[in-house]
Amino acid sequence: MKFIDEFRNSTVGQRLAVRIKERNTRPVNLMEVCGTHTVAIFKHGIRQLLPKKVNMLSGPGCPVCVTPNSDIDKAIALAQNPSVILVTFGDMMKVPGSYSSLHQVKAAGADIRVVYSVLDALRIAKDNPRKSVVFFGVGFETTAPTTASAILEAERLGIDNFFFLCVHKLIPPAMRALLNSDEVHIDGFICPGHVSTIIGSQPYEFIPREYGMPCVIAGFEPLDILQAIDMLLEQLSAEEPRVVIQYRRAVRKDGNPIALKYLSTVFEVTDACWRGIGTIPKSGLKLGQQYQRFDAECAFKIVSRPPKEAAGCRCGDILRGASTPNECSLFAKACAPEHPVGPCMVSTEGTCSAWYLYGSKE
Amino acid sequence: MPKARIILGHGSGGKLSHDLIESLFLPPFTNPILEACDDSAVFPVTDSSKPFQHQGEPEERIAFTTDSYVVKPLFWPGGDIGKLAVCGTVNDLAMVGAIPLYLSAAFVIEEGLPISSLRRIVTSMKRAAKEARVKIVAGDTKVVERGSADGLFINTTGVGILPRGARISGSNAQVGDMIILSGTIGDHGIAVLSEREGLVFSNNFKSDVAPLNHMVQAMLKTSHKIHAMRDPTRGGLATTLKEIAQQSKVGIQIIEEQIPIREEVAAACEILGYDPLYVANEGKVVACVAPEDAERVVQVMRKTRYGGEAAIIGEVLPEPKARVVMKTKVGGTRIVDMLTGDMLPRIC
C-alpha cells in the first residue's frame, strides 16, 4: 500500500531503533496520549525495539474508556425507551455501565444500531420518522466536527426526530489535568495525530511553556512512532522543550479551520466528567443555545439509578498512566475481551485490550 | 446481574464460540469422536459389534460434518450463499484429508423470497458441487413466516471417505513443521462487507469462496508428512493458527511480511480498522508440513487453481506452547490471539 508500506519499512525501523538505543539519555517516561498510538505500539511490536530506559505510558486518549459510567447509564436508559432508536459506534456496545451494557439491553430487545458515521444516524432518523433517533456520540476533537455537521444538516433538512447525547471531550485540558497531579511522572508527550489534524499544534504550546515538557505530534505508523520517540529524546537531551509536528503529512500548525468553524458554531465548551480523572474544567463540549432542541438530555427525561463502579476495576488508574493493566488483579482473569469488567478492556483502543491481545498477559 | 443471553459474538467463531462449545455443548454430547474438535468427525464404518478385518490393516473410515449458512447478503462479489454452503462443507471434509462424496442440503426460507433468487442460488450450488465432484443426495425445505428468518438459511451436511492411514488433525502439528498458507487473506470477509455496507472505495473486492478438495488431494499425493490442515474461515487466519497451537500444544511463529494479502483488502482493513488476520476466508487452507516436504508442497499448490499464491508463512516451534507469535514488518514481535467479540457478524 502506497503511503503505508513506506512507514513500515524494516530497514529504516531498525536504524531508528538503533539510534534510540544509542541516545545517551536518563530513564524517561513518555506518554502516548492517544489510544490509537497505544494499539499501534503493541500491534507493531514497538516496545521490544525500545531500550529499557525508555518507558512508554498510555494516557487518557481512548474516547470509549474515558466516558464515565454515569453517561453510559444514560445511554442505556434511553435505549430502553421503546420510542427510541439508539445509534452509536461499535465499541460502545460492550462497555459495561453500572448495571448493564448496551449489548445486553439490545439482546433483550432494545433497538440499538451500530454505525460507522454520525451521518448514518441521520439517515436512520430520515427512514424512521415515527421513532426518536438518539446518537450517542463519544469522541474527541476528531469526531466532534462530523457530529456538528450532522446537526447542521438535520437543521437544514428540518429533521425533528434526531437527537444527540453529547459526551464529546477535549484532549489538551486532560493533559493539563494529568500534569497538575503529581501522581505520574511524565517526561514527554506523544500527542495524538488525529486530534491534531483538527486542532493543530497551538493548543499544546502551554505544555513546554508552563511545564517545560517536550511534545511531538506523531502519525500512527511504526516509523512515525519511532521517529517521534527519537525526537522527544533529542529535545530532552538538548533541554529545549517545544511542540514539534512529526506527522507533517497530515497536521498543520493551525489545524483544520473549517472543522474548527463547525465546532465553534454548534458547540460550547463546558466542564466534563472523565472516568478515572473526575471533572476537568472546560474539557467537554455541549450543544450551543441555538441547537438545544437536538440535545437528548433536554428532550427526554432520562431516569437512571446512581452510577457505581465495578469492584476491583482499575481502568481509572490505567487511564491516568498511574497503573499498567498487569497491576490490576482482574486483568486477564475476571476481565478479558469476551467478558470485560472495565472499558479499557472493551475498546479496540483501550490499554487493557491492547495488552491482552498483543502481548503482555503476565 | 442481568440474565445471560446469547450475543452475536457467540457466533463469531472466536473465543466466545469456543467457550460456548466447551461449556454448553461438549459436556452433554461428549464422546471421543466429537472431542477431536476437527473440521469433520472421523470414525470407522465397520460395525464395531462385528469386527471383521484383517490383522494390521487400518480400517476404512469416513469423515462427516455439518454447517449452517446464515450469511447476509445472499449474493456478493465472487459468490453467494449456495456456493458457500457447498464449498464450506466440502472444505471441512477436505481438511481432515477426506475425499468429499455426498452432501445433504436443507433450506430454511423466509416467506417472500423471490423464487428467481432461490433458483439462482440452487444453480450456483449445482455448479459448485460439480466442480467439487460431490453429489447432493438428500434435502429438506422449510418456509417460515416473514420476519422469522432473513431471506434464506442453508444447512449442508457432508460425508467423505478417508484414504487408509491418513492422520491429519489440528492436534497433530509437529515441532519443526513449516506453516503453509494457500493464498491471500481477508478476501471473503471484505467482499461480503463491501456488498453489505455499500463500500464504494473499490470495486475490486472478490470473495475467495471455492472448493479446496482437489488442491488438498494434490498436496496429500505430494507428501505424507502433512500433519495438520484447517481452513481459516470465521475468526480468520489468527484464530485458526491459535486453535492449532492450542490443540497440538506447540508454539507457532509467523512472519508478517510473508503473509499474502491483496492490496485493496489491506487498504480496506486499514480504513475500516480491521486486522486482516481476523477477517474471514472461504477458499484458503493452512497446513503444517514437515520441513523437508514444505517447498515441494508449495510448488504443487501453486499449480492448482486456488493455490497460485501459496507461501510458507512461518513454522512450528516447541515454545511458547499454545501461543502464536508474529514477527512484525518493522522488526518487533507481537502475540496473535483468537478473535474476541463479533468483528463481522453473519459472514458465513
Image: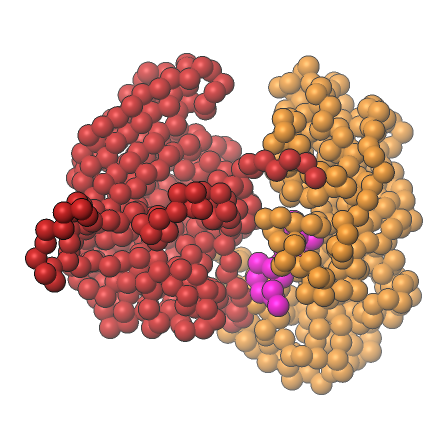
Q: Position of residue A352 (x, y in %)?
A: 66, 58
In the image, A285 versus B181, the foreground residue is: B181
On screen, residue A30 versus residue B254, left or right, reads right
Q: Position of residue B250 (x, y in %)?
A: 41, 68
Asked if residue B78 is positioned above or below residue B213 in the image, the reply reads above
Where does the magenta region start and end?
A: A344-362
Q: Position of residue B130 (x, y in %)?
A: 18, 35
In the image, A91 versus A12, the foreground residue is: A91
Residue pictured at 18% horizontal, 40% vertical: B101
- Reply yes or no: does residue A358 show up in magenta: yes
Chain colored red: B
Chain colored orange: A
Query: Residue A229 lies in what quarter of the image?
Result: bottom right
- Reply yes or no: does residue A47 show up in magenta: no
Q: Is residue A245 visible?
A: no
Residue pictured at 40% horizontal, 60% vertical: B247
- Image quarter hosting the C terminus of chain A: bottom right
Furthest toward the left, the residue is: B54
In the image, B63 versus A145, the foreground residue is: B63
Residue pictured at 79% horizontal, 59% vertical: A317
